[in-house]
Amino acid sequence: MSTHIGAAPGQVAPHVLMPGDPLRARWIAETFLEDPVCYSEVRGMYGYTGTWRGHRVSVQGSGMGLPSISIYLTELFVDYDVQSVVRVGSCGALSEELVLRDLVIASGACTDSSVNRIRFEGLDYAPVADFDLLRRAYDAAAELPVTTKVGLVLSSDSFYHPRPELSRRMAEYGVLAIEMEASALYTLAAQHGRQALAVCTVSDHILAGEETTPEERQQTFGDMVGVALEAMFGRGPRGHR
Ligand code: HPA
């Protein structure tokens, strides 16, 4: 096992779905995967491996924020040789063109975190998604009854932001939504030469001050998991959604 993941070598699949919430990881495994096996319960951050349409896939909780997801990603890449990760999360919309339950596919991630400023000694690195994953996710999302937007997100260190006016500044420059992990995901995937994508449903609207109900979140979350699986493995036969 690695420091924070209780899996034996080989127990984690090369392709991993990553929700922030470990209970969502369990729900995805039990709802979407055949023969799911729990490989880690360390800190309650569940990880499961099963198969989807014959493809071996794992689901690993990331926790909230750049530091937490960075720990799990580093161990997945270094200790378990994971090749691709698709984050399935939620975000707060900044764009007037988004409504609750819409899908945001992050083509790139801005951040207010200092992690990359330290990593790149003051240079501004632009963390971006893997294009093949992004293209397949967009094609799969086109069949959903919600709008999908592709563009920038802001990966913030703060859920309760001390400077909300800065989020509005980002919105003026086309940033679609706020979440808390994509920048670390794209940076670490680049560092290790792996593929990564973040797909998020709009759970709340920062400008309009609205939020989804738990039932809506569950439905949209399930749709997004289907999109993420098709992004990783391509389209299956019709009628198998
Ligand atoms: N901020 C950060 N992350 C989020 C938000 C938010 O408003 N909503 C959902 N995830």
Image (cartoon, helix red, strand yellow):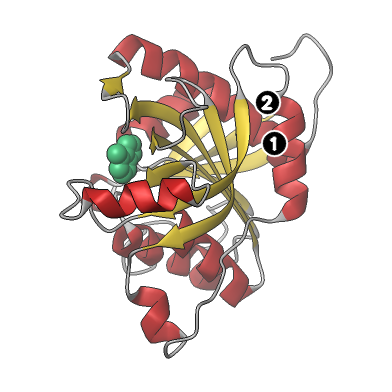
- In which quadrant will I find the C terminus? top right
Identify residue for label 2: 141
Residue lying at 32% horizontally and 31% vertically, measured from the top left = 207
Q: Position of residue 163 (x, y in %)?
A: 20, 55
Residue lying at 53% horizontally and 47% vertically, measured from the top left = 174
Locate residue 178 relative to residue 80 in the image: left or right. Answer: left
Residue lying at 38% horizontally and 45% vertically, measured from the top left = 178
3D distance between C-alphas at marks 2 and 1: 6 Å
Q: Position of residue 231 (x, y in %)?
A: 70, 38
| Helix, strand or loop status at disc 1 | helix
Residue 67: image quadrant is: bottom left
The response on whether ligand 1 sits within 8 Å of label 1 is: no
The residue type indicated by label 2 comes to: Ala
The residue type indicated by label 1 comes to: Ala
Kindly check if marks 2 and 1 are in contact, taking CB atoms under 8 A apart as contact: yes
Return the residue nearer the eye: 175 or 26: 175
Residue lying at 77% horizontally and 50% vertically, measured from the top left = 132
Identify residue for label 1: 137
| Helix, strand or loop status at disc 2 | helix
Label 2 crowd (10 A; few <14 / some 14-19 / many >=20): many
Residue 90 visible? The answer is: yes
Return the residue nearer the eye: 52 or 208: 208
Answer above or below: position of 58 versus 211.
below
Locate residue 118 relative to residue 82 in the image: left or right. Answer: left
Answer above or below: position of 123 versus 43.
below
